[in-house]
Image: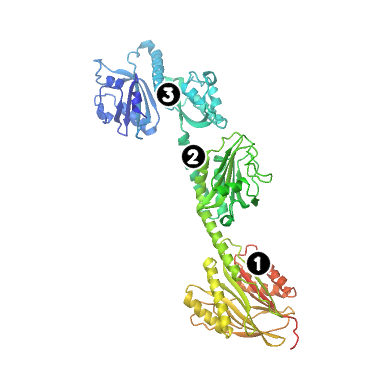
């Protein structure tokens, strides 16, 4: 508030600051009546000669409650410097809370002297006239600011023109008078405003406050706060006087804080990304937009700009009255799609248009459903995390709702920032998983072509979102003609486990190729290396050699270090686990000895090596899974080896399998020519 504006006022004006009501400003009329009271002093000190102390309490109440008070024709008994008048003089006071230009809270007093009018039978008429004159003067001052002043009859209905109202709304006096003001209120706010106003009239409330949207002269809407009070003659309300103040900025700030608080409550305790995005969409609709759809971009890290886009729709919310959102699904979008363009630009795509008439470059294909039929505006907002567009949000306003603008885009951005941490985690998981899977698959080589032997391999990564394990298998032929089969599992389900797996796999391959030693001795050397180089690592492993001691005969030399036992299935379907060469897992016992065993391999038999993911299930004893595997293998042994492996995976694995699975199967010929 600029205090200088009150200097030429024909009525007394005083402004105080703070709870002690220190005099901050008095205009010339005020000083002429009450004297040049020292600025900076509390009013109780500046007016030691004031007989009525209740006026000080009036300032306390107004500052504390913010409710304006009007005293009409009240006596003031003190020493008046401008006249030797005997006895009290009468004044009408209007006291309200105000904020000065430096941001401090205080009280504004507007004073009109009515001493000469307080006489006999003319008192009511004079008071009414003086009130009207004081109101007109005060309104002239307020008109210089941003408020609108209006006057209605005791039962409602505007009775006086308002230049401020006409300036803000563009309504003429004929359009404004009576109940015409209602036409300027936003259609969605009218019923509540009329009901609240009528209740204040019926109850003759001491004050009416309300906030609604007013249509501006340019056609837009802004929020205005109404503050009105009845003018009384005794117990009779003779009219109402009110103001309308533009509070759009304050309303936006309040709404922003409320929405952020709601978002914090809605997402509290949520860990899953899809659930968080759905909760945020539920806050956005209907307070900010009429529709909100969120897409995750699963291939965002490696998608070149300008190429087709795969988007997974994980959240879709519409306000009541609009068609239900479509089910979650994966969508494949061409590079010319507006969604793909927004992703490539990494900046919002915003358009405002007549309802139901989006511009050609924005209109989605017939099978897209992210834009409502009567939409009047749309925002395609990429959610960029660490330079990567991790998600895309589409939002629209429809029908008579004001189009989305810059304020709504900024608010959407602020709300969606709550999802940045889980989105960043999702990107990091995606990056880690793709690297680990690529590493695993680069090491899980095809089986060698060995005359007389059929070898098949299988690998299935975990279906759990954060699981990338250390399972491996390998097979190769040594210089002495033996075929090596090995399978293992490094503890852990992350990228370091996959890296360690690759190192152990290569180390074991090197030891087996270099050393013509029993399998137990080779595992002992590998165990020493693990305990020396990988202090925090443990691993399980099966190392086996398929040898031909004589033409047409095969035998298996093997060692098992903490790993599930190999399964041998005869041609007749008899299946048993090989448990003769068990020893502790690698990296566990510095003094461990790794035993070996030799097992003849009958013609037509099938040998299966596998990792624990094939037999383990949550809340189930391992022996149950092993027995299930034995039964399924016995039943499927007459199938070709590839079909045999597929049948075991299908029978053993669940939809939500949460561990990696590796399997290596070898089948001997049914009979071999002697020789």
Query: Is 100 above or below relative to 502?
Result: above
Q: Residue at x 65, y 67 (%)?
A: 653
Rate crowding at label 3 as few (under 14), some (14 to 19) or many (20 or more) other CA atoms within 10 Å.
some
**Which of disc 2 and disc 1 is earlier in sequence?**
2
Q: Is residue 257 above or below residue 233?
A: below
Query: Mark on residue 653?
Result: 1
Q: Which residue bears the numbered disc 2? A: 255
Residue occupying image coordinates x 59% and y 83%: 581
Marks 1,3: beta carbons within 8 A: no
Looking at the image, residue 534 lies above or below residue 154: below
Q: Identify the secondary structure beneath mark 1.
A: loop
Residue that carries the numbered disc 3 in the rendered image:
143
| Residue 630: quarter of image | bottom right
Q: Residue furthest top?
A: 121
In this rendering, position of residue 30 left or right of residue 482:
left
Residue 420 picture location, percent across and down: 51, 52
Q: Position of residue 528 (x, y in %)?
A: 50, 80
């Amino acid at each position: 508030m600029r205090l200088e504006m009150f200097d030429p006022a024909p009525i007394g004006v005083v402004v105080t600051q703070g709870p002690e009501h220190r005099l901050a400003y008095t205009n010339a009329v005020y000083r002429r009546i009450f004297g040049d009271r020292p600025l900076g002093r509390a009013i109780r000190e500046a007016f030691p000669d004031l007989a009525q102390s209740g006026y000080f309490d009036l300032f306390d109440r107004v500052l504390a409650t913010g409710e304006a008070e009007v005293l009409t024709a009240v006596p003031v008994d003190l020493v008046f410097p401008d006249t030797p008048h005997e006895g009290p003089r009468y004044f009408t006071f209007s006291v309200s809370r105000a904020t000065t230009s430096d941001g401090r809270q205080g009280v504004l007093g507007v004073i009109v002297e009515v001493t000469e009018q307080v006489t006999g039978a003319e008192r009511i008429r004079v008071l009414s006239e003086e009130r009207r004159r004081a109101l007109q003067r005060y309104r002239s001052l307020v008109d210089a600011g941003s408020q609108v002043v209006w006057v209605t009859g005791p039962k409602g209905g505007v009775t006086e023109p308002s230049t401020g109202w006409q300036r803000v709304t563009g309504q003429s006096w004929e359009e404004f008078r009576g109940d015409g003001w209602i036409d300027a209120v936003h259609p969605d706010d009218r019923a509540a405003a009329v009901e609240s106003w009528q209740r204040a009239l019926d109850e003759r409330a001491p004050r009416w406050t309300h906030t609604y949207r007013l249509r501006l002269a340019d056609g837009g809407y802004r929020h205005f706060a109404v503050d009105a009070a009845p003018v009384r003659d005794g117990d009779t309300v003779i009219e109402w006087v009110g103001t309308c103040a533009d509070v759009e900025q304050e309303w936006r700030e309040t709404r922003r804080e409320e929405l952020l608080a709601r978002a914090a409550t809605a997402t509290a305790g949520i860990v899953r990304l899809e659930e968080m995005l759905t909760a945020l969409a539920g806050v956005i609709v209907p307070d900010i937009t009429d529709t909100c759809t969120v897409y995750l971009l699963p291939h965002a890290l490696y998608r070149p700009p300008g190429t087709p886009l795969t988007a997974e729709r994980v959240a879709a919310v519409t306000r009541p009255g609009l068609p239900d959102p479509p089910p979650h699904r994966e969508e494949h979008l061409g590079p010319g799609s507006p969604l793909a363009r927004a992703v490539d630009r990494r900046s919002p795509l915003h358009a405002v248009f007549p309802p139901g008439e989006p511009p050609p470059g924005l209109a989605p294909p017939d099978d897209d459903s992210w834009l409502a039929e009567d939409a009047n505006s749309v925002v395609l907002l990429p959610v960029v995390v660490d330079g990567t567009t991790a998600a895309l949000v589409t939002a629209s306003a429809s029908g008579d709702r004001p189009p989305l603008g810059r304020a709504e885009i900024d608010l959407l951005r602020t709300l969606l920032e709550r999802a940045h941490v889980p989105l960043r985690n999702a990107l990091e998981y995606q990056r880690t998983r793709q690297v680990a899977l690529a590493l695993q698959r680069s090491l899980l080589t095809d089986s060698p072509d060995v005359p007389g032997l059929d070898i098949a391999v299988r690998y299935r990564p975990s279906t759990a979102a954060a699981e990338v394990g250390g399972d491996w298998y390998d097979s190769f032929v040594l210089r002495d003609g033996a075929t090596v089969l090995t399978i293992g599992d490094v503890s852990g389900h992350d990228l370091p486990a996959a890296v360690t797996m690759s190192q152990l796999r290569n180390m074991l391959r090197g030891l087996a190729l270099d050393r013509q030693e029993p399998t137990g001795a080779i595992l002992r050397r590998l165990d020493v290396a693990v305990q020396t180089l990988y202090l925090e690592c443990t691993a399980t492993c099966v190392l086996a050699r398929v040898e031909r001691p004589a033409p047409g005969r095969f035998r298996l030399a093997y060692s098992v270090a903490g790993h599930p036992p190999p399964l041998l299935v005869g041609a007749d379907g008899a299946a048993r686990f090989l448990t003769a060469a068990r020893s502790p897992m690698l990296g566990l016992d510095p003094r461990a000895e790794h035993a070996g065993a030799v097992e003849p391999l009958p013609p037509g038999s099938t040998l299966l090596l596998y990792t624990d993911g094939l037999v383990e299930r949550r809340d189930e004893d391992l022996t149950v899974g092993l027995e299930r595997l034995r039964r399924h293998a016995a039943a499927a042994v007459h199938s070709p080896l590839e079909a045999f492996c597929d049948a075991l995976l299908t029978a053993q694995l669940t939809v939500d399998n949460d561990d990696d699975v590796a399997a290596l199967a070898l089948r001997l010929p049914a009979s071999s020519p002697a020789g």
